[in-house]
Image (cartoon, rainbow, N blue to C red):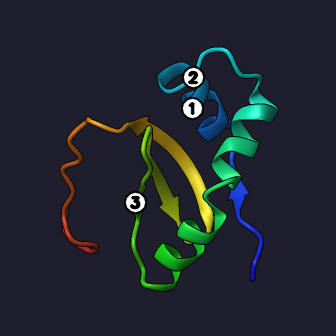
Amino acid sequence: MTAVHVTHHAAQRYVERVNGNLTLEEAAEAIRGHASAIEAAAAFGCRVVKTSSAKLILEGRTVVTVMNRHWLIISQPRGHA
């Protein structure tokens, strides 16, 4: 299994939007706790992993940001502007 990378930005957003009581390192560890789901999603080319408390936005096996679980994500197919 390839390691999951969590950006500093993603950890900051987790603290801001999901659990403000965590440090950035604790937030990154909380995100990494979903590594198996992130790995599976990345293998299928998915860009979002929905957990019980957040939506993890992916670029490959890197979590680039975190959104509130209930926020709507509107996206276009890749290659379309």
> Left or right of 40: which side holds 6?
right
Q: 51 and 57: which one is in front?
A: 51
> Left or right of 59: which side holds 51?
left
The residue to which callout 1 is attached is 14
Q: How far apart are marks 3 and 2 (CA)?
A: 19 Å
The residue to which callout 3 is attached is 48
Residue at 50% across / 60% down in the picture? 58
Please provide percent x and percent y for residue 59: 52, 64
Nearest to N terminus: mark 3 or mark 1? 1
Residue at 54% across / 68% down in the picture? 37
* Residue 5 position by quadrant: bottom right
> Quick one: label 3, few (<14), some, or many (20+) residues within 10 Å?
many
Say what amino acid the circle numbered 2 marks.
Asn
Look at the picture and state if 38 lies above or below 64: below
Dot 2 falls on a residue whose secondary structure is: loop
Nearest to N terminus: mark 3 or mark 2? 2
Q: 76 and 46: which one is in front?
A: 46
Say what amino acid the circle numbered 1 marks.
Tyr
Which quadrant is home to the N terminus? bottom right
Dot 1 falls on a residue whose secondary structure is: helix
> Left or right of 60: which side holds 53?
left
Q: Residue 19 carries which label?
A: 2
> Left or right of 60: which side holds 8?
right
Look at the picture and state if 21 lies above or below 52: above
